[in-house]
Image (cartoon, helix red, strand yellow):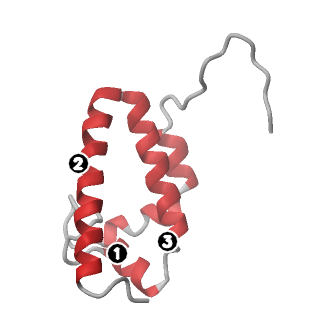
């Protein structure tokens, strides 16, 4: 789809929390099953999201779309803190990737 909007530089999401929650209820239902209420769903023990990703109950693509929408929403809300958090996420991802390669790769 192409939208011709002369003079418009960018389109963005504003106050999209409710829309994201409504669109990803299947993803967010896993959150209440985590061992810890402040679970970040990255490497915590007892994380229901990671377990669901591992056993196929939650599609990885669906999870990645959810995470992407959350990050975009955070970006709109606060660009400065978003960029700091993005750097930290990239560092974590890089370290995780190196560790995974060191341990023999991703196993399905």
Residue appearing at x 49%, y 47% in the figure: 69
**51 sits left or right of 25 in the view:** left
Number of the front mark, 2 or 3:
2
In the picture, residue 86 is in which quadrant? top left
What is the secondary structure assignment of the residue under circle 3? helix
Q: Position of residue 66 (x, y in %)?
A: 48, 56
Relative to 25, does residue 4 appear above or below in the rendering? above
Image coords of residue 62 (percent x, y): 54, 65
The residue under the point 20% across, 58% down is: 38
| Residue 40 seen in render | no
Rounded to the nearest angstrom, the CA distance separating label 3 from label 1 is 10 Å
Q: Say which of marks 2 and 1 sits in front.
A: 2
| Res. 33 image quadrant | bottom left
Along the line of sight, the residue nearer the viewer: 84 or 67: 84
Residue at numbered disc 2? 88
> Residue, x 34% and y 75% (percent of image)?
50
* 62 sits to left or right of 102: right
Where is mark 3, residue-wise?
60
Q: Nearer the viewer, residue 11 or 107?
A: 107
Residue picked out by circle 1: 50
Can you give x and y, in whole percent of width and height, for residue 76 in the image?
A: 43, 29
**Quick one: 30 or 43, which is closer to the camera?**
43
33 over 75 or under it: above or below: below
Residue 100 visible? The answer is yes
Determine the image quadrant of residue 97.
bottom left
Task: Identify the element where label 2 is drawn.
Answer: helix
Where, quadrant-wise, is the N terminus in this rendering? top right
Name the side, left or right, on which 88 lies relative to 10. left
Residue shown at 43% from the left, 54% from the top = 67
Neighbor class of circle 3 (other Cα within 10 Å; few <14, some 14-19, many 20+) is some
């Amino acid at each position: 789809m192409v939208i011709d909007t002369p003079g418009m530089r960018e389109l963005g999401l504003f106050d999209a929390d409710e829309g994201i929650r409504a669109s990803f209820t299947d993803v967010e239902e896993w959150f209440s099953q985590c061992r810890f209420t402040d679970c970040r769903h990255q490497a915590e023990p007892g994380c229901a999201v990671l377990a669901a990703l591992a056993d196929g109950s939650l599609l990885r693509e669906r999870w990645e779309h959810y995470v992407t929408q959350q990050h975009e929403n955070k970006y709109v809300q606060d660009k400065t803190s978003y960029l700091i958090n993005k750097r930290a996420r990239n560092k974590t991802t890089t370290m995780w990737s190196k560790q995974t390669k060191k341990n023999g790769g991703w196993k399905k």
